[in-house]
Image: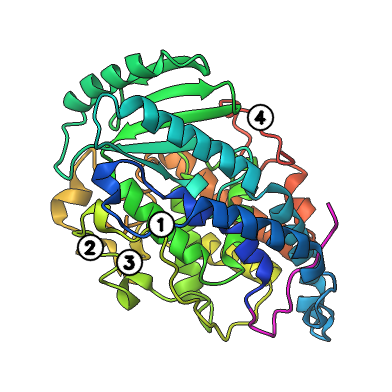
Amino acid sequence: MKRTSPPNQNTGQQPRFSRFNSNASNNMNSSSGDWTSRKRSAIDESDTNASYNQRSSRRSNTFSHVSNSNRSNNNADTNLSRVSQSMWDNFNSNVQSFECFSRKLQLKDAIHEMLKEIIPHIGVYIVGSSANGFGMNHSDVDICLMMTENEIDQKFEAIQILKIFSRALKRAAFIRRIEVIHAKVPIIKFQDSHNNLECDINLNNHIGIRNTHLLKSYSEQDWRVRPLVLQVKRWAKYHNINDASQSTVSSYSLALMTIFYLQTIVKPAVLPVLQDLYPDKFDKDIPVNELRLNEKLPSYTSENTMSLGELFLGFLDYYSKFNFQMNVISVRKGEIYPRSSLPREDFTARYSQWKFILIEEPFDLSNTARSVHDEYVFEKIRDVFSRSKRRLEETRNLHSLYKERFYDDEKFHEYDYDR
């Protein structure tokens, strides 16, 4: 792949490449079935395929010259231009391709075809990183099945329904190693051998559809958002702090932390507060089937000219000093609010979800970082932020963050950060 350079930071211009790479998210949330469609607007996939080829042919020419701002007389900016270039290269190499997205669409459509024989009006949505603009080529695909706007008992009813769906899916020759996982949100887990995809299916998780819609909209507001979030995820994964099953931070929480930082901490702001600007579009009470999931919002014009490298170093610096235990991060409000403002029973209970890192879910207002419930692990996470900030500040070299793992507990699996 031909190496390109990040766009000129001082122009404020939205690079064409960000549209090229967001083509997948334009389609990903298109739903299937009578219940979810109801003649709502959706992007024609044939049009998207055609425009993809045109955007692809322009890709290598869009950023063929290093921006003058990266060669400015400002020493900090000059040093961090290498970091910016490395972040941009990593983004281009790892961001979810159109081909990868197409395979996920094929799987979604195949699942709909099989399950509509059981429930004709069922809705099928791709959710999570595959659909919110922050996916990578090796990302698994998460799918939500919507049967009704009413709540379904996840502990009992959802498991029984998923078992019925699992038996139907087993008939397909390409579905391997299928099982129903009993959890707080139960899932069907399987491998698509035809498309080489790992897939998790949940039932009636409308919050997942709403937050996918919100994050997708944020990913399209400024060209720096997606490369920065992918860099944060890559860094956190390498240092073993990006795995909720191991009591560390989920990718969703990392994305919210990044968005909050861009909304509130950097000056001028890189991102607006979308739930304030467009309350009618992100109202949690809007039925899922009435959400305009493919509608593009106007891009936010930020006066901030910080480079990718400056933003990443600032992110590490801010959270290395942040008082996680006393402040709640809110993307919904674009502000932090004190832990003391939470309902008293929420944070005094022995098994409270509000423990060490407090990040408000923008729709159901729960804590997205409740997985961090172990004090030892929490202190290690803080240490990773501090050591990473110092290392990058000293070396001005992104690769220096991948010489050693700052949290290398033996219970964590090895991760190839060059994937």
Q: SS for tag 1?
A: loop
Mark 4 highlights which residue?
Answer: 414
Q: Amino acid at mark 3?
A: Arg
Q: Nearer the viewer, residue 375 or 371?
A: 371
Q: Amino acid at mark 4?
A: Glu
3D distance between C-alphas at marks 2 and 1: 43 Å
3D distance between C-alphas at marks 4 and 1: 41 Å
Magenta stretch: give its range. 1-13
Mark number displayed over residue 340 = 2
Q: Amino acid at mark 2?
A: Ser
**In front of the other: label 2 or label 1?**
1
**In front of the other: label 4 or label 1?**
1
Q: Earlier in the sequence, mark 2 or mark 3?
A: 3
Apparent side of residue 146 relative to residue 211 in the rendered image (left or right) = left
Q: Nearer the viewer, residue 248 or 130?
A: 130
Mark 3 highlights which residue?
Answer: 332
Q: Residue 111 lies in magenta, yes or no?
A: no
Report x, y in % for residue 81: 79, 70
Q: SS for tag 4?
A: loop
Q: Residues within 10 Å of mark 4 (few under 14, many from 20)?
A: few
